[in-house]
Amino acid sequence: MTNTFASTPHQAARRGTLVCQASRRRYGLASLRNTIAAWRQRARFRWDLKRISEANPHLIDDIGLTRQQVDEEIAKLPFWQR
């Protein structure tokens, strides 16, 4: 005699595992997107800082940075070029 309900807990546990894996994938993807967004924001900041320091160097004092700090920030390379 076969019990049709015997496989139900196994299927429920399996569905729970799939849901857990999917949520981990979504979290991993969201984390990757956040990392990329932060990298782009920093790269854009450095690009803007370089442009401002060349075109209007007096604005560097207005944002509270020294020339040395600006030069150090502009000189930073992406992690794959280090």
Image (cartoon, rainbow, N blue to C red):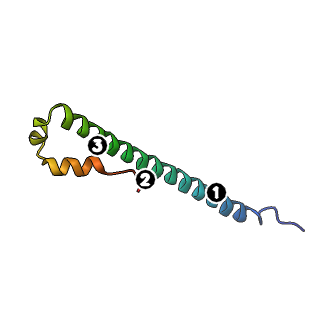
Q: Quadrant of the N terminus?
A: bottom right
Report x, y in % for residue 55. Answer: 19, 31
Q: Which residue is mark 2?
A: 81
The residue tagged with tag 2: helix, strand or loop?
helix
Q: CA distance from mark 1 to mark 3?
A: 42 Å
Q: Position of residue 73 (x, y in %)?
A: 25, 49
Q: Nearer the viewer, residue 50 or 13?
A: 50
Depth order, front residue of 25/39? 39
Of marks 2 and 3, which one's residue comes earlier in the chain? 3
Label 3 amino acid? Arg
Seen in the image, is 9 located left or right of residue 28?
A: right
Q: Amino acid at mark 1?
A: Leu
Along the horizontal axis of the image, is 58 left or right of 4? left
> Mark 2 or mark 3, which is nearer to you?
2
Say few, some or many: other residues with alpha carbon within 10 Å of mark 1 (under 14 / 14 to 19 / 20 or more): few
The disc at residue 18 is 1
Q: Residue at x 16, y 51 (%)?
A: 68
Q: Residue furthest bottom?
A: 1
**Residue located beneath label 3 in the image:** 46
As drawn, the label of residue 10 is none
Tell me, yes or no, whether the two marked residues, 2 and 3, touch with CB atoms within 8 Å.
no
Marks 2 and 3, Cα distance to the nearest angstrom?
16 Å
Nearer-the-camera pick, 30 or 51:
51
**Residue under the image location 71 percent in, 60 percent down:** 11
Question: Which quarter of the figure is the C terminus placed in?
Answer: bottom left
Q: Residue furthest right?
A: 1
